[in-house]
């Protein structure tokens, strides 16, 4: 009597898989900047987004560098976790170059929103003008929006138990990121900055859809061909213990 092959180990996947090149660089840069700011707090004042410094001192780098600084461990933790969970598949689909461009457009759009509002005659403009805003939340919110647009019904397990559509899961993660970012410097400006990131990401995706439609078509075509070949050649990703003669071809 043949005995089924013993299986001593098993593997399961968590999240979208290994870090893709652009996201790996972004996370490493954010972590390095966070640690540097802990050692030299003055870095935050120099690199964080403060409209008064941009206008009066010509600190033109701030609309870019602000997104690499964070106000606390939970602020950076939730932002980087969301970037990994929802950005990896987008980078695989779009390619590293387009994803990186999209990321900076969303983050830059969030900064531009704050700058524009700080220069208006609105009652709260002075508070925007002299406040300091930091964090990758604006760019990450753009990533969350893109993921929800492309994979709205994909089931994701909340707390590893409750499957819910990706669009609702993104809303939950976005709310957590929002609450954590409000504890950072310039938290009162966070709502507007996030909205700016969402709007910039949406407009960029709609206006620049032609620039990445071919990579997306290629990505989906290759997935279709792989699944077709699996069915054609009877390829299985795994088996059951009772399937003694089942093999991977």
Image (cartoon, rainbow, N blue to C red):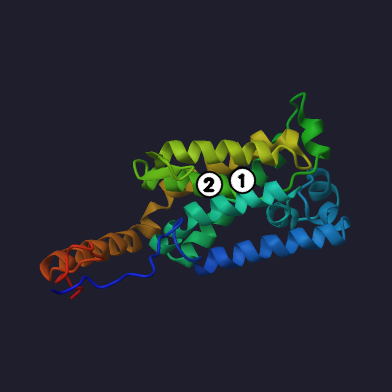
Q: Secondary structure at mark 1?
A: helix
- Residue bearing the label numbered 1: 138
The residue pinned by badge 2 equals 142
Q: Position of 79 compared to 49: left or right?
A: left
Q: Nearer the viewer, residue 2 or 195?
A: 2
Residue 239, quarter of the rendered image? bottom left
Percent across and percent down for residue 123 are 77, 23
Indicate whether 111 appears above or below 96.
above
Depicted 175 relative to depicted 22: above or below: above
Query: Which residue sits furthest left?
Result: 232
**Quarter of the image containing the N terminus?**
bottom left
Q: Position of residue 128 (x, y in %)?
A: 77, 35
248 above or below 152? below
Residue 37 placement: quadrant: bottom right
- Can you see residue 243? yes
| Residue at the image position 74 percent from the left and 33 percent from the top | 188
194 over 37 or under it: above or below: above
Q: Residue at x 68, y 40 (%)?
A: 180
The residue drawn where x is 38% and y is 65% is 10
């Amino acid at each position: 009597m043949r005995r089924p092959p013993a299986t001593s180990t098993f593997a399961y996947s968590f999240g979208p898989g290994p870090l893709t090149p652009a996201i790996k660089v972004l996370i490493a840069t954010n972590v390095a900047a966070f640690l540097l700011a802990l050692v030299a707090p003055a870095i935050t004042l120099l690199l964080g987004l403060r409209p008064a410094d941009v206008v009066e001192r010509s600190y033109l780098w701030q609309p870019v560098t602000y997104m690499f600084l964070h106000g606390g461990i939970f602020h950076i933790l939730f932002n980087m976790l969301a970037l990994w969970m929802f950005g990896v598949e987008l980078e695989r689909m779009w390619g590293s170059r387009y994803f990186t461009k999209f990321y900076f457009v969303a983050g830059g759009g969030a900064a531009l929103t704050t700058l524009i509002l700080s220069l208006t005659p609105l009652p709260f403009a002075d508070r925007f003008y002299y406040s300091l805003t930091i964090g990758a939340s604006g760019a990450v919110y753009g990533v969350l929006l893109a993921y929800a647009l492309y994979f709205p019904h994909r089931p994701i397990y909340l707390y590893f138990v409750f499957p819910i559509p990706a669009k609702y899961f993104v809303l939950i993660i976005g709310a957590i990121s929002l609450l954590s970012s409000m504890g950072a410097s310039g938290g009162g400006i966070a709502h507007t900055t996030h909205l700016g990131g969402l709007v910039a990401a949406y407009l960029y995706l709609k206006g620049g859809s032609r620039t990445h439609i071919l990579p997306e078509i290629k990505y989906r075509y290759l997935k279709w061909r792989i699944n077709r070949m699996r069915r054609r050649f009877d390829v299985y990703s795994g088996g059951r213990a009772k399937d003694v003669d089942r093999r991977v071809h």
